[in-house]
Image (cartoon, rainbow, N blue to C red):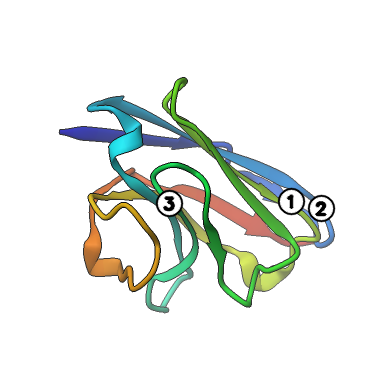
Amino acid sequence: QLQLVESGGDLVQPGGSLRLSCAAFGNNMEDYTIGWIRQASGKDREEIVCISSSGAVTDYADSVMGRFTASRDNAKKTASLRMRNLKPEDTAVYYCAASHRKGCAGTTLGDYGYWGQGTQVTVSS
């Protein structure tokens, strides 16, 4: 079993920056691909980042490419998401999630079997 706990969500002005963290408890983190998924009010969940189990591959959605940077530290069992140049449309609940898949190719939301509780990010002036 794997438990995930996100933190770092906050209210930030447009153009601002924020760093989200995800702590893993239980099984070894290196056995899982990690995804960052967000859900805005009234919208479907959107996978914005996928990091392969080794951390060698990181895939970003077009909506965050160039603004968000994801990383993981398997030894510390943590993952992080650095967000820059935030926009109002980035407002959402952000989740980290884990999949038994080793890589990101072909990964869908349904592959993520472990989810954190989510952390709210609000971008507003």
Label 1 with label 2: CB-CB less than 8 Å: yes
Residue 62, quarter of the rendered image? bottom right
Label 2 vs label 3, nearer the camera = 3
**What amino acid is found at the position of numbered circle 2 in the picture?**
Gly
At horizontal 29% and vertical 25% (from top left) the residue drawn is: 25
At horizontal 77% and vertical 54% (from top left) the residue drawn is: 84
Position of residue 60 measured from the top left corner of the image (x, y, whole percent)? 57, 66
Label 1 vs label 2, nearer the camera = 2
- Residue on which the image places disc 3: 52
Position of residue 85 measured from the top left corner of the image (x, y, whole percent)? 81, 60
- Residue on which the image places disc 1: 12
Residue 111, quarter of the rendered image? bottom left
**What amino acid is found at the position of numbered circle 1 in the picture?**
Val
**What amino acid is found at the position of numbered circle 3 in the picture?**
Ser
- Residue on which the image places disc 2: 16
Determine the CA span between mark 1 and mark 2.
6 Å
Number of callouts in the render?
3
Q: Secondary structure at mark 2?
A: loop
Determine the CA span between mark 3 and mark 1.
29 Å
Q: Secondary structure at mark 1?
A: strand
* Quadrant housing the C terminus: bottom right
Position of residue 82 measured from the top left corner of the image (x, y, whole percent)? 67, 46
Label 3 vs label 1, nearer the camera = 3
* Quadrant housing the N terminus: top left
State the residue in front, 86 or 11: 86
Mark carried by residue 2: none
